[in-house]
Image: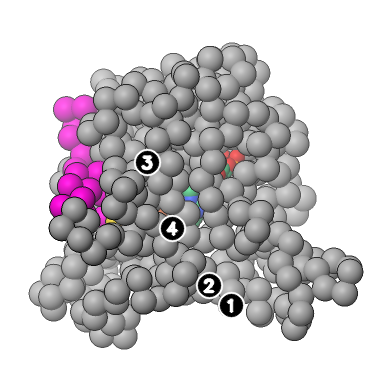
Amino acid sequence: MCTGCGACAFHQPEQIRMHDVVDAGLRPVVQDTHAGRRASIEAMAVCPGHSLTHDPSRFPAGTIDSLRPGWGPILELWEGHARDQEIRWAASSGGAASALALACMERLGFAGTLHIRAREDAPERNETVLSTRRDELLAATGSRYAPASPCDRLDLVETASAPCVFIGKPCDVAAADKARAQHPALDDRLGLTIAIFCAGTPSTGGTHKLIQRLGLREGERLESVRYRGLGWPGLARVTVRGDGTSRELTASYADSWHLLQAHRQWRCYVCADHTGEFADIAVGDPWYREIAPGEPGSSLVLVRTARGKQIFDAAVAAGYLEVKRAAPEILERSQPQLLKLRGGLVGRILTSRALGAATPRYRGLPLWPFFRSELDLREKARSFYGTAKRVFTKRLLVRRPVASEGEG
Ligand SMILES: Cc1cc2nc3c(=O)[nH]c(=O)nc-3n(C[C@H](O)[C@H](O)[C@H](O)COP(=O)(O)OP(=O)(O)OC[C@H]3O[C@@H](n4cnc5c(N)ncnc54)[C@H](O)[C@@H]3O)c2cc1C
Ligand code: SF4
Ligand code: SF4
């Protein structure tokens, strides 16, 4: 049930480290000792993989009734983009995540932003960094459809001189939320959490397949890998170097995602939170309308907590974001498949459990109402028998030791 968030490696750094299993994702390797086994049990307290619990008594007053069951607590919806044109252009959607982080760092006294970026030595893989300057934020813009463990360096937030922003996928933010309950110093320094919407993380093997499909030649090495951005949604762009010259290989967003999504880790198939329900602010794509060719980027922004609202308002007032209020219906129109997916989890989870495969436990993230309302009879049946097939084709009952998979 690992999502690859890295929180266990932060919680037990002496005993646990993250390791990229090429055909699965980033996974924890635990020291094979008594101390290692103890650490692994203790790390369950911060792990979002096995269970997520939403406590409505923690929701702020005024969350939108019609959205709460399917999308979690939302105070306000906005559509807009970064005022900084370079960030807007480079970013995944409209650069709202980076613009909010920049406002926190330049105007609100934050020390930095913990997030991920491409590794310089291996640009098809990711690393976690604490960015403290605009150029560092800019260099990390764009969604990376590859394993990333932003929680593995929560120690950088814990020891920072002032509050920090944390940006990650919904499971990363849920892990940071669990970790702050165990680490008072982290709780004190985690000033804002921003979740990016997420349909699933493809493995590094997916990126390898994409690069091969784009036409990497023998002897060429990777200089950079981007999955989108530099326009909206932008192209997948891979720069390769061989014989002293560089060339760029590209694929459309639709073609590259079509190939990559087939390599998503299993945990994503049983994920109930694709929109960052545990975050202060969540950002995604406003796909509710056709995007004209060359249209500059735009973000859908969900303000989820009182702290999120305070910071969002301050960032807008200081001119970091240009936004207009959005109607609640826009969320479902932007992500039309998500409620169906949530309903389908009933069949996926019950079938997996019946066949002996691991499943996550969700409390306070309702599934049954969407099973009843969003799926027709055929889809309901398919969510059961489709999963039964997958339990075997995806070898979910087979234990695969991480350490034997080669260094990442
Ligand atoms: C795996 C994945 C699946 C996605 N699925 C959806 C979807 O279903 N629907 C949808 O609307 N949008 C999806 N997105 C895109 C993303 O949610 C939006 O583009 C979001 O609006 C962020 O845009 P932005 O312009 O504000 O971000 P930017 O300003 O470009 O900043 C992006 C931030 O995200 C961080 N980041 C990038 N990749 C990752 C990663 N793999 N793990 C953790 N942090 C990362 C970067 O470090 C950076 O701080 C997905 C992104 C990823 C990485
Ligand atoms: S989901 Fe996160 S905390 Fe849980 S095992 Fe995986 S990396 Fe560790
Ligand atoms: S789909 Fe869910 S579990 Fe998978 S990476 Fe995204 S947020 Fe995490």
Residue 250 is one of the magenta-drawn residues: no
The dot on residue 199 is: 4
Split into quadrants, the picture shows ligand 2 in the one at: bottom left
Residue 385 pos. (x, y %): 22, 81
Q: Give the structural element (helix, strand or loop) at label 2.
A: helix
Residue stretch in magenta: 38-58
Residue type, label 4: Ala
Q: Could you tell me the amino acid type at mark 2?
A: Gly
Residue at (32%, 80%) from the top-left corner?
A: 394
**Badge 1 or badge 4: first in the primary sequence:** 4
Q: Position of residue 35 (x, y in %)?
A: 18, 53
CB atoms of marks 1 and 2 within 8 Å:
yes
- Residue at numbered disc 2: 206
* Residue 259: percent from left, percent from top: 55, 74
The residue tagged 1 is 209
Which residue is labeled 3 in the image? Answer: 173
Q: Secondary structure at mark 4?
A: loop
